Image (cartoon, helix red, strand yellow):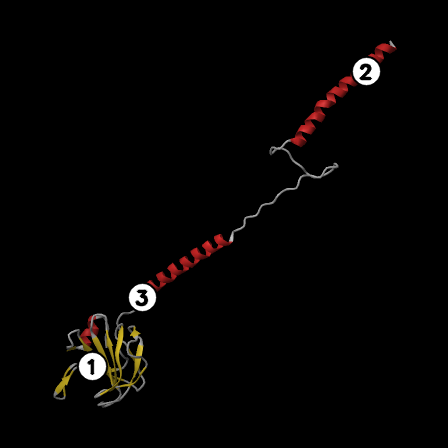
Amino acid sequence: MVVAAVAVGAFATAGAGQALQPAAGNNVQLANRTDGTATFDGTGGDTASAPRLLTTSRKTASEGAVEAAKLLRSQQIMTRREAAEAEQKRPKFARPAVGDFTSAYGARWGRAHLGIDIAGPIGTPILAAADGVVKDAGPISGFGQWVRLVHPDGTITVYGHVDSYNVRVGQRVQAGQQIARMGNRGESTGPHLHFEVWNPDGQKINPLSWLNDRGVTV
């Protein structure tokens, strides 16, 4: 009976040992696996867990230069668009001066008056009636001092009896830009602007009609 008991115990021990082996084998396989299901928590044991590699996104110098160039182009496009919009909105014609309309175009005092007169205090701003280029600026017989502008279509506008001017020959100006100040120089009976319009053929036409046709009233 004792022998039988010992034998039974031996078989039981051997069976238990065999039952534990597969479990140990599974642990080894899990530790050696390289797929995404294996995990290492770094706790316990004599072996340190494998370090994790962290990757960061870095732009090279050339990539940064490309990005900067793209940004600059975008800013330039926006600047050009804003300038074009502002150009479309700004007035293309302007009243040459603020003041009292004192003399029309036509016969006056027995002779032709080939412009219009706008009276005001000395120093009143005189403005370009349209975009153009300064043709003359300085002393002239009869007017004392004048400014003449030539416009893109060949029309010329004349600003006479000016007290002073702040433009130079060849300078580009825009409609509404100040070019001179009202004065009483030359053959003048009081401070005023004498304004003339010459068509591309050089004929002196009615400035009032020319301004009115372009939406400007005096």
Which quarter shows the N terminus? top right
Whichever of callouts 1 and 2 sits on the residue coming sooner in the sequence is 2
The residue lying furthest to the left in this view is: 110
- Disc 2 marks a residue whose amino acid type is Ala
The residue lying furthest to the top in this view is: 1
**How many angstroms separate mark 3 from mark 1 (CA)?**
29 Å
Which quarter shows the C terminus? bottom left
Q: Is residue 43 left or right of residue 138?
A: right
Q: Residue at x 79, y 18 (%)?
A: 13
Q: Residue at x 19, y 71 (%)?
A: 213
- Disc 3 marks a residue whose amino acid type is Glu
Q: Is disc 1 surrounded by few (<14), some (14 to 19) or many (20+) residues within 10 Å?
A: many
Assign a secondary structure to mark 3.
helix
Query: In the rendered view, would you say 62 is above or below 122?
Result: above
Image coordinates for residue 208, horizontal then vertical, percent: 19, 77
Q: Is disc 2 surrounded by few (<14), some (14 to 19) or many (20+) residues within 10 Å?
A: few
Assign a secondary structure to mark 1.
strand
Assign a secondary structure to mark 2.
helix
Q: Is disc 3 surrounded by few (<14), some (14 to 19) or many (20+) residues within 10 Å?
A: few
Indicate which disc residue 87 carries: 3
**In the rendered image, which quarter is residue 131 located in?**
bottom left
- Cβ–Cβ under 8 Å for marks 3 and 2: no
Q: Nearer the viewer, mark 3 or mark 2?
A: 2
- Cβ–Cβ under 8 Å for marks 1 and 2: no
Query: In the rendered view, would you say 53 is above or below 101?
Result: above
Q: How many marks?
A: 3
Image coordinates for residue 47, horizontal then vertical, percent: 72, 37
Q: Nearer the viewer, residue 141 or 217?
A: 141
> Which residue does the numbered mark 2 point to in the structure image?
10
- Cβ–Cβ under 8 Å for marks 3 and 1: no
Whichever of callouts 3 and 1 sits on the residue coming sooner in the sequence is 3
Q: Is residue 95 visible?
A: no
